[in-house]
Image (spheres, rainbow, N blue to C red):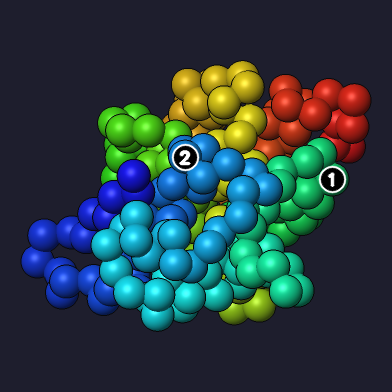
């Protein structure tokens, strides 16, 4: 049974019903509880989560916008299938944009602390979903200060699809310990203010993931 996933933090306002459903569905997709290609029937999901259909419908719209769900004419929603074409498309975009954004970012102490906290959260994650989302928070902390809102938006739009691809890849070949070490190396370069090294390590990090998981189409 799908259970509401509590992602709230102490001292914050209680999430809306749609937000609760959204996090529950996202978590179920990223852990594989909801399988790639599985139909998402509003009435069934509402009953399993214990809510009305309205927040489920709204949450599915958000998930479709972020790329975790596909909406099919006359059939409703389904969990997005992860194939090599999707993974390559997502990581090719990241490889083109993220090293540049991270290298341009001016990181405050607050941003560096946020990146470090995200890595700690990833190290202590309960499952692949929480770990993948914590990793996405780390990456965003590094690129959000690049000074180009269009670049930030383009990378933000890839966050959930990146989380989905990484979760599926980890299910086949767990590699988060290696990626955690690479994250620490990127953060060390950022803390030292070495933009050239940040770009190089970020590019190497993204390329290494592709090489491990999609070797026949290794990124150039």
Percent of width and height locating residue 19: 34, 70
Residue at x-position 51% and y-position 38%: 32
Badge 1 density bin: few <14, some 14–19, many ≥20, Cα 10 Å: few
Tag 2 secondary structure: loop
Q: Which residue is mark 1?
A: 85
Around disc 2, counting alpha carbons within 10 Å, would you say few (fewer than 14), some (14 to 19), or many (20 or more)? few
Question: Gap between marks 1 and 2, in whole Å?
Answer: 23 Å
Q: Is residue 62 visible?
A: no
Q: Nearer the viewer, residue 87 or 198?
A: 87
202 to the left or right of 177: right
Q: Quadrant of the N terminus?
A: top left
At a point 55% along the width and 75% down the height, the residue shown is 61
Image coords of residue 113 (percent x, y): 30, 51
Location of residue 146 with respect to 203 vertically, above or below: below
Q: Name which of mark 1 and mark 2 comes first in the sequence.
A: 2
**Which residue shows up at 90% across the image and 25% down it?**
216
Q: Which image quadrant for residue 97?
A: bottom right
Residue 29: x percent and y percent? 51, 47
Which of pointers 1 and 2 indicates the residue nearer the eye? 2
Residue 215 visible, this angle: yes
Task: Identify the secondary structure beneath mark 1.
Answer: helix
Q: Residue at x 29, y 50 (%)?
A: 3
Horizontal side of 179 relative to 46 (left or right) equals: right
Q: Which disc is residue 33 wearing? A: 2
Q: Nearer the viewer, residue 182 or 38?
A: 38
Up-down: is 70 above or below 178?
below
**Which mark, by number, is residue 4?**
none
Image spot of residue 98 (x, y percent): 66, 54
């Amino acid at each position: 049974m799908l259970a509401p996933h509590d992602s709230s933090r102490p001292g914050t306002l209680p999430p809306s019903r749609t937000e609760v459903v959204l996090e529950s569905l996202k978590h179920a997709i990223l852990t594989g509880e909801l399988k790639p290609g599985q139909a998402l029937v509003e009435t069934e999901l509402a009953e399993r989560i214990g809510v009305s259909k309205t927040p489920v419908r709204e949450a599915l719209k958000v998930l479709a916008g972020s790329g975790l769900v596909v909406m099919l004419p006359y059939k409703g929603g389904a969990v997005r299938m992860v194939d090599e074409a999707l993974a390559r498309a997502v990581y090719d975009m990241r490889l083109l944009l993220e090293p540049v954004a991270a290298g341009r970012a001016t990181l405050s102490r607050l941003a560096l602390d946020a990146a470090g906290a995200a890595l700690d959260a990833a190290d202590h994650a309960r499952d692949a979903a929480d770990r993948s989302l914590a990793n996405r928070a780390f990456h965003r902390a590094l690129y959000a200060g690049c000074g180009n809102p269009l670049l930030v938006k383009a990378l933000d739009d890839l966050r959930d699809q990146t989380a989905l691809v990484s979760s599926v890849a980890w299910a086949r070949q767990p590699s988060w310990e290696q990626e955690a070490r690479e994250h620490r190396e990127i953060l060390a370069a950022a803390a030292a203010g070495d933009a050239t090294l940040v770009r190089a390590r970020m590019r190497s990090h993204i390329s290494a993931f592709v090489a491990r998981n999609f070797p026949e189409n290794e990124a150039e």
